Image (cartoon, rainbow, N blue to C red):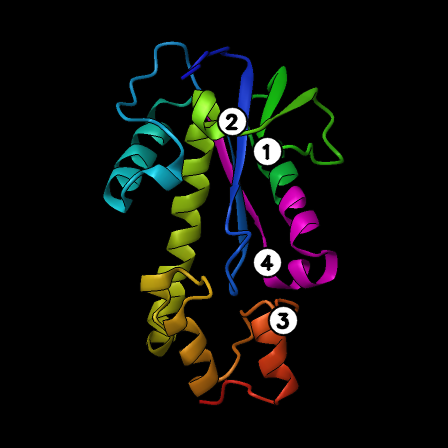
Amino acid sequence: MDFAILPSHAGVDEAGRGPLVGSVFAAAVILPPDYDLPGLTDSKKLSEKKRDALALLIKEQATAWAVAWADTKEIQQYNILHATMRAMVRAVAGLNIPPAKIWVDGNRIPAGLSIPAEAIIKGDLKIAAISAASILAKTARDAEMYALAKRFPQYGFDKHKGYGTVAHLAALQQYGVLPEHRQDFAPVKALLAQGKLFTE
């Protein structure tokens, strides 16, 4: 793994493009050369317990970090791709130290960045700052799902994290669509067409 560290460079990644509900999150992280983050890698390859532990360490050790999001209204207005890019731009803007360059996970650079950026495919496996950003974005996204699960326990958001699992689709069919659901996503759109809205 190429875990090169440049103290003036920020890694940027997102979490939550695929789920049927909730915001899409992005994070930006600048790591110091002497970071100590055992097991740091792409958030998807880590257990939830390990992600949570690393998230705390990242926030303690990072030279700068920021988390941002785009909510379901923005996702519907701009589509999920462009909403994700907006969240990434916000995360970079939230850094209290402007980076000299940004490494973005994936194959697309968000429009509206005023800082030089490079898109890196599978960057969350190659560059430590992107791995760190992926963890902060994912843990923030999961926190939103836990909060939603407390409000609407019948949907099981704490278990499936909003993805279109069999259990989530069954809950949607039984209880209806919440305002927090992404109305343009096909399974939700189909239920809305049937008039299946959540009622207390």
Percent position (x, y) of residue 31?
A: 44, 19
- Where does the image place residue 12, in percent across and percent down from the top left? 55, 31
The percent coordinates of residue 27 (x first, y second) are 51, 37
**In the rendered view, would you say 149 is above or below 140?**
below
Magenta stretch: helix, strand or loop mostly? helix
Please state which of residues 6 and 105 is positioned toward the viewer in this rendering.
105
Q: Secondary structure at mark 2?
A: helix
**Which residue lies under the disc numbered 1?**
106
**Do callouts 2 and 1 mark residues in contact (Cβ within 8 Å)?**
yes
Using the image, tell me which numbered label, if any, was put on residue 183: 3
Crowd class of label 3 (few under 14; some 14 to 19; many from 20; radius 10 Å): many
Q: Which residues lie in the magenta part?
A: 64-86
Q: Nearer the viewer, residue 196 or 165?
A: 165
The residue depicted at 63 percent of the width and 15 percent of the height is 100
Q: Measure the alpha-carbon separation of dots 2 and 1.
A: 7 Å
Query: Which element type, helix, strand or loop, lies under badge 1?
Result: loop
Q: Earlier in the sequence, mark 1 or mark 3?
A: 1
Q: Which residue is mark 4?
A: 71
- Mark 1 or mark 3, whichever is nearer to me: 1
Quarter of the image containing the C terminus?
Answer: bottom left
Q: Nearer the viewer, mark 2 or mark 3?
A: 2
| Whether label 4 touches label 2, CB < 8 Å | no
Nearest to viewer (mark 4 / mark 2): 2
Question: Mark 4 or mark 3, which is nearer the start of the sequence?
Answer: 4
- Looking at the picture, which amino acid does disc 1 mark? Gly
Q: For the point 46% across and 33% down, which residue is it?
A: 133
The alpha-carbon separation of the residues under discs 4 and 2 comes to 25 Å
Residue at the spot of label 2: 123
- Three-letter amino acid code at disc 2? Gly
- In this view of the protein, can residue 96 be seen by the observer? no
